[in-house]
Image: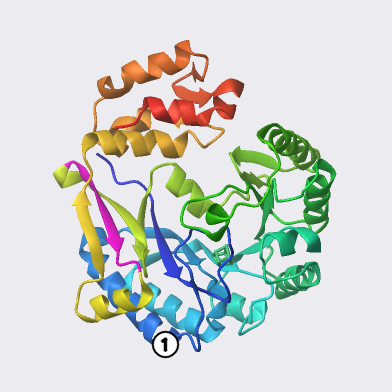
Amino acid sequence: MELPPLSLYVHLPWCVRKCPYCDFNSHAVKGDIPADEYARSLLKDLQQDLPLVWGRAVHSVFFGGGTPSLFSAEQIQGLMNGFRSLLRLSPDAEVTLEANPGTIEHDSFSAYRDAGINRVSLGVQSFSNDSLERIGRIHRREEAERAIKSIQRSGIENFNLDLMYALPGQSLADAIEDVRDAIGFNPTHLSHYQLTLEPNTAFYADPPRLPEEDAAWRMQEACGELLRQAGYEQYEISAWARPGSQCRHNLNYWRYGDFLGIGAGAHGKITVPSENTVRRRIRHRHPSAWMKQVGNGNGLAEDRSLQSSERVFEFFLNQLRLLDGVRKDQFEPRTGAAWGEVSGPVSQAIEKGLLKDQNGVLAPTDLGWRFSNEIQALFLP
Ligand code: SF4
């Protein structure tokens, strides 16, 4: 096995309110966030992983959540200083902060920029106040616009807008209007997700009426066309970027790179060539339980070596989301498995017209792109 690029994910798990469709590890704020204690725990948590990554450069940092912008710029700065002292952070590392409009941001985006943030991902979801209300967001269009303008004023040029489509009561024209509005702000990156009903969410328990699958497909197609015309390139099922502005952090996940994951419920993946394996490390999920366990010297709820079949599945699961597809020559160095383990499913996918094999790269066909679940099922452990 070879060591792939390494990233750092930092989970900040609080939100002003829980959105009814959200299945992330996020918790509604009750009273004050124990932000200082949580930040100290993060640095302690990171120290536990260091022996697995000594000397390796970290190419990206991602503050995800939750709503990381509920933490002040000073706290983010303190964390960045800590990361720099503990890790070999590349001078040109991409450092992303997720933020939500309508949150009581402690600071302007200029202060976050000064703290070391050079990319912002803003959860706009829709520019329609009707849609925002129907999906239980706390913000309105005006707050999203204010937040975007604040990012632009801060000099952070690299920013993403998250949009969702196939929302309750949304028409094709509404979905197109949302994308048109987003393009008007000229983000470098746009994430365009279909709203799905996930178990353990309020929407799952009491589902709203969503557009039919065919209508959702038409929205995806029409919005995609608009994005292409505006100069965005799709590089993943839900991700569009201006040339050269793909999210490096997410690309590393999808290419089956390594990542440290710190904070409540965070997942990490570390390649260990000497053992020909990959370690999966998962932190305790609840913030207070995790802080308590970190205080006791071990925030890990799970730490195990992935079996060969799991590594193979994850390798394909991740990369088949990418338009570029899967580089066959990366299979053995990244999974430690022999190509013979997957030659059967790969042939089946090609015979079914789901994958094409071009110059050593396996890429989904149009059919495979639409039925990506079928391809993934072929590689299930
Ligand atoms: S703001 Fe994001 S992370 Fe927080 S509850 Fe809503 S969808 Fe989940």
Q: Quadrant of residue 57?
A: bottom left
Q: Which residue is mark 1?
A: 36
Residue 101 on image: x %, y %: 68, 71
Colouring rule applied to residues: rainbow
Where is residue 14 drawn, in percent x and y? 49, 74
Q: Quadrant of ligand 1?
A: bottom right
Q: Give the image location of residue 122, x and y in percent.
A: 65, 64
Q: Is residue 4 magenta?
A: no
Mark 1 Cα shell of 10 Å, populated few (<14), some (14-19), many (≥20): few
Q: Residue at x 23, y 35 (%)?
A: 308
In this image, 136 relative to 313: left or right? right
Out of 66 and 3, give the one closest to the viewer. Answer: 66
Principal secondary structure, stretch drawn in magenta = strand
Residue positioned 31% across, 74% down in the render: 290
Q: Is mark 1 within 8 Å of ligand 1?
A: no
Left or right: where does residue 196 sit relative to residue 145? left
* Left-right relation of 253 to 273: right
Name the residue rendered at 37%, 62% in the picture: 266
Quarter that holds the N terminus: top left
Instruction: Decide: is 50 above or below 257.
Output: below
User: Residue 366's quadrant in the figure?
Assistant: top right
Residue type at tag 1: Asp
Tell me the quarter of the image containing the C terminus.
top left
Please report the bounds of the magenta region as a residue range.
Answer: 276-285
Q: Secondary structure at mark 1?
A: helix
In the depicted structure, whether residue 293 falls above or below residue 359: below
